[in-house]
Image: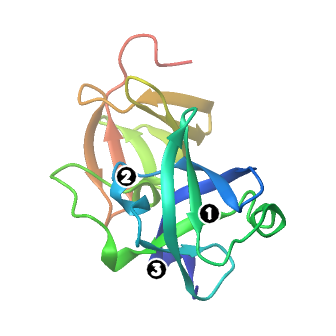
């Protein structure tokens, strides 16, 4: 891999399973076909792609076999690493949809121009995402819903929001 900015993470290896080289993957994509048999993935720190040999759901994660992983020891080396696709292979998104790496680092301010800080992390919950913003007043948690997020300008590096009652510290 050249630079991470040319790639999108679609999974993270969170463990191994069995003795035949299966890895346990936390899926980081809304497109499960990324793990279909024959799909090609980059492993963090490697220069060539690996082919998906098989994948199946297991206890909230995926059990994935990648080419070149023949045993548990080989799979163990991948623990904690991310699985990527090339950015040009990304699925097109709809209007007002963004990839996580496009949002991280945006300056967040209210519609009135008050600086809240920088979007540093996205927490994935069952209902909606929550944006974690670090700023002069500390940490602010913003639900990623239309009532809160008013404007996103990735090119300008800014997100404008309306704070609902209870969101202010």
Q: Residue furthest top?
A: 166
- Residue 67 placement (x, y as % from top left): 59, 76
Identify the residue shown where x is 28% and y is 50%: 152
**How many other residues sit within 10 Å of disc 2, few (<14), some (14-19) or many (≥20)?**
few
Residue at the image point whose x is 66% and y is 82% from the top = 46
Please tell me which of labels 1 and 2 falls first in the chain: 2
Q: Secondary structure under badge 1?
A: strand
Which residue is label 3 attached to? 6
Residue ID at (49%, 68%): 52
Q: Does residue 138 sit above or below 9 in this rendering?
A: above
Residue on which the image places disc 2: 32
Residue 108: where, in percent of width, then height?
43, 44
Is residue 115 positioned above or below 45 on the image?
above
Label 1, label 2: how many angstroms apart (C-alpha)? 16 Å
**Camera-nearest residue between 80 and 105:** 80
Residue 82's tag is: 1
Q: Earlier in the sequence, mark 1 or mark 3?
A: 3
- Secondary structure beneath dot 2 equals helix
Q: Nearer the viewer, residue 40 or 70?
A: 70
Q: CA distance from mark 2 to mark 3?
A: 21 Å
Q: Earlier in the sequence, mark 2 or mark 3?
A: 3
In this rendering, the label closer to the viewer, 1 or 3: 1
């Amino acid at each position: 891999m050249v630079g991470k900015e040319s790639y999108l993470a679609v999974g993270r290896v969170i463990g191994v399973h069995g003795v035949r080289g299966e890895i346990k993957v936390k899926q980081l994509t809304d497109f499960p076909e990324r793990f279909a048999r024959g799909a090609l993935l980059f492993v963090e720190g490697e220069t060539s792609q690996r082919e998906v040999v098989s994948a199946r759901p297991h206890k909230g994660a995926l059990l994935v076999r990648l080419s070149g992983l023949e045993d548990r020891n080989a799979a163990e080396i991948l623990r904690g690493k991310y699985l990527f696709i090339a950015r040009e292979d990304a699925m097109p998104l709809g209007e007002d949809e963004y990839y996580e790496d496009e949002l991280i680092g945006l300056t967040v301010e209210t519609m009135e121009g008050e600086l809240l800080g920088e979007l540093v992390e996205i927490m994935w919950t069952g209902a909606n995402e929550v944006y974690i913003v670090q700023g002069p007043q500390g940490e602010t948690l913003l639900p990623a819903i239309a009532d809160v997020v008013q404007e996103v300008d990735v090119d300008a590096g800014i997100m404008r929001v309306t704070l609902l009652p209870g969101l202010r510290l």
